[in-house]
Image (spheres, rainbow, N blue to C red):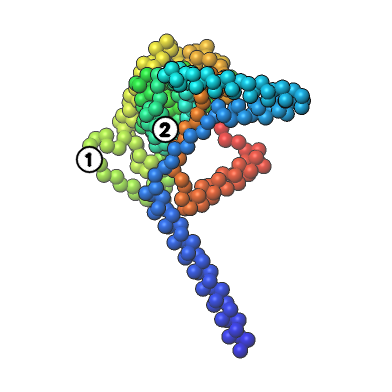
Amino acid sequence: MEFLYEYGLFLAKAITFVLAVAAIVVVIAGAAVKQQHKKGELDVTDLSEQYAETEEDIIHALLSKEELKEKEKADKKQAKEKAKADKKAAKSGDDKADAKAHVFVVDFNGSIDAKEVSSLREEITAILSVAKPEDEVFVRLESGGGMVHGYGLASSQLDRLRQHNIPLTVSVDKVAASGGYMMACVANNIISAPFAILGSIGVIAQVPNFNKLLKKHDIEFEQFTAGEFKRTVTMFGENTEKGKEKFIEELEETHVLFKNFVSERRPSLDIVKVATGEHWFGTTALELGLVDSIQTSDDYLQGKSKSHKVVAIKYEVKKGLAEKFSKAASLSAEGLIGKLLQRNNIFPG
């Protein structure tokens, strides 16, 4: 009898576990399907208000009680005078005369495939629907480059602003190299932190080849193509000299396109000197003409907030449950690898 009781309890636990796992799988699958059809949302943040609130908090912490009373009186008087002036302007039909121009802030933290361009295109489209020539778009850019077609499209999205005569400033606090600089050079004005990395106007391709390893284990690799250069080099077959030459020719063609793109947007550059694939720190990049001034994005925006209304624009698709689990697992793995590297004093180049 005791055996039957324990068996029944075990069976109940097993069924409960299976049902729980099945429920989680159904929820994740449902969330993933729903996510495919869900549209993203545009998030608008008033950075000017944030700067003002921070300044107010600091002032309140520094002033004495008497000084605070005096400040409050002065603020109330100023608010009344402004309200009166606004009312007068509204009556005269000049209510927009005192309106501040806008600085629209966009963040682009690019990956190798530049998948962030899908959000960038939505942000640019939203800005163009309301921006005026007296406004400005400010892009905080961070990217070490990646795939040509991805960064080509990202650069074209920024170029839409130039075509509509909206001033564009790009800020590089850390890195804008290769495809990242391809995006940066579109701007009317490029600012850089002193130790930011810029340049790398070049093209690179690395292809591992396992042909000798396959031969060693008597494994044949067969590839069928139509067209002499449908496949120039391969990872598993034996690469021919003719195929390698064609592949290098394609890289050179891409490099020429890259150089022409940069030259058209920054004609004062000595393109022969800077298009060697090298990268430079911000201060040297300024001397070479790759950037226009040395300044951090924080200083620039804080200064602009005094005369402009600064707002951050971010387009984001809400992540489904499946994506959240995937991202959490990815971050955990990255964190673990980082700890192991630090523990063993190993750092990537």
Where on the picture, by quarter, is residue 59?
Answer: top right
Exactly how many numbered labels are in the figure?
2
Q: Which residue is mark 2?
A: 123
Amino acid type, callout 2: Glu
Spatial CA span between label 2 and label 1 = 42 Å
Residue drawn at x 64%, y 29% is 54
Q: Where residue 305 sits: x, y (%)? A: 55, 22
Residue count near mark 1 (Cα–Cα under 10 Å), binned few <14, some 14–19, many ≥20: few
Residue count near mark 2 (Cα–Cα under 10 Å), binned few <14, some 14–19, many ≥20: many
Image mark for residue 226: 1
Amino acid type, callout 1: Ala
Q: Where residue 340 sits: x, y (%)? A: 63, 44
> On screen, 115 above or below 326?
above
Taking the image as shown, residue 235 lies to the left or right of residue 337, namely left
> On screen, 325 above or below 20?
above
> On screen, 13 above or below 82?
below
Taking the image as shown, residue 52 lies to the left or right of residue 200, namely right
Q: Nearer the viewer, mark 2 or mark 1?
A: 2
Residue drawn at x 42%, y 19% is 93
Residue drawn at x 56%, y 73% is 13
Residue drawn at x 31%, y 35% is 232
Q: Where residue 295 sits: x, y (%)? A: 57, 19
Residue 190 in view (yes/no): no
Question: Is 60 or 290 nearer to us in this picture?
Answer: 60
Where on the picture, by quarter, is residue 227?
Answer: top left
Q: Where residue 249 sits: x, y (%)? A: 33, 26
* Viewport quadrant of the C terminus: top right
Image mark for residue 321: none
